[in-house]
Image: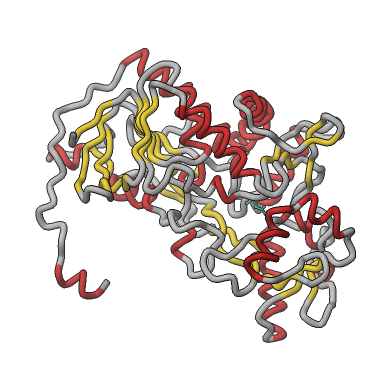
Amino acid sequence: MNEARSDFLIIGSGIAGLSFALKAAETGTVTIITKKARAESNTNYAQGGIAAVVAPDDSSDLHIRDTLNAGVGLCHRDAVEVLVREGAQRLMELQQIGVEFTTINGRLDLGREGGHSRNRIVHAKDRSGWEVERALLHAIASHKNITVFENHLAIDLITEHQLGRPIDEVIHCWGAYALDVDRNEVKTFLSPIVVLCSGGAGQVYLHTTNPAIATGDGVAMAYRAGAKIANMEFIQFHPTTLYNSGSPAFLISEAVRGFGGILRTKRGEEFMSRYDERGALAPRDIVARAIDTELKKSGDEYAWLDLRHLPPSSVKEHFPHIYETCISRYKLDITSEPIPVVPAAHYSCGGIVTDLFANTSIENLYACGEVAMTGVHGANRLASNSLLEAMVFAHRAFVDADRRLRSRRPEIPSVPSWDETDTFDAEEWVLI
Ligand code: SIN
């Protein structure tokens, strides 16, 4: 079978794609294509959690202010308002499908991360993304309307270009060509609604927290198809990844600093208070630049993240994944030894430009999650706003797509099979 049709085509299987799929499957057939195994997404590796206004001492206005401050004046206020005001509702939906967040005495345990003026990080210990992905995959597994194609690498969006039609002002999308990696053949996936949820581009950098799948192909496909792209220069560097852990760099969650971890030079000096009154809990761009400055001044290869003053049992209790990984993989006991850390590429704040309902500049094409530029992150994303953005805008994308299908369902023209003539350039291959 070289052609598949469905009411919704989703590219990517992280929180954005899967949460969209669950809603869409209530109204029509859904195809998800994903380039590796279905759980292999950035979502799966997120440690910190989801920022949401649930505490009595918190308010939407405070979360909005913190997000705007972190974004250094470049966030779109209307998008930030949507993000924050709709977040709690989406969080409840995750709980309803079985995501088990960490609680204390029956209430959500709220962690703290850089740039937040309140404790508002809802988490599942230090494997929040893994828990969200687990529950979403479990929920879609039993849905008869959802078909997942693993090891299918989307290679091009289908627009007027493939039809040989002239492209006027409005470009339309009707699906995507994808390489079935196991069979080494290109298939045609057609749909009146295409949702790009293919994540970020961390692998463009040598040192990144992102898994191997994060190669930016979603932005590249949309760019080739003529979509508007913006803010790609705003790559966020996470301040604390384990030094020398190879690629991908092992993340030491910002929640560890929120829990009291202190950043020190190799000589033991606490330095963040010299850079910002919020110390190690300043937004990420400030902390990453401070570490970089200290390393350049001293010639050191890393800084220390020191947890030795914290009770070992509570470090193990709150960060079991980080503790176990450091012990078993790196022979490092984070309760009794300082952690050597360096910044690494973590998140693309820019991407495919969307409106408040995740519409891109191409008709019938939506973008959600890290691949999108909704305007909420500006020049620097506030910690734990990423999973939040993905689920808030995936929901809005579904609302809009559903409306579109009901009011004027886009017609899919006759689309040719993938033509690989001239796709191999021997000279270019030599260069690669
Ligand atoms: C972290 O746990 O530090 C990462 C969370 C995020 O990227 O927001």
Quarter-of-image position of residue 365: top left
| Picture coordinates of residue 219, whole percent (x, y) | 39, 49
- Residue at the (17%, 27%) spot, across then down: 413
- Residue at the (41%, 34%) spot, across then down: 366
Query: 316 or 102, which is in the foreground?
Result: 316
- Residue at the (29%, 28%) spot, across then down: 191
What quarter of the picture does the N terminus occupy? top left
| Picture coordinates of residue 263, whole percent (x, y) | 79, 68
Left or right of 307 in this view: 99 = left
Left or right of 17 in this view: 340 = right
Q: Is residue 384 above or below residue 311?
A: above
Query: 321 or 302, which is in the foreground?
Result: 321
What quarter of the picture does the C terminus occupy? bottom left
- Residue at the (71%, 64%) spot, across then down: 287
Left or right of 113 in this view: 143 = left
Task: Residue 73: tell me if it is visible.
Answer: no
Q: Residue furthest front?
A: 328
Q: Is residue 322 above or below residue 138?
A: below
| Picture coordinates of residue 286, whole percent (x, y) | 70, 63
Query: 7 or 40, which is in the foreground?
Result: 40
Left or right of 50 in this view: 359 = left
| Picture coordinates of residue 210, whole percent (x, y) | 52, 57
Q: Residue furthest top?
A: 407
Q: Is residue 132 above or below residue 311?
A: above
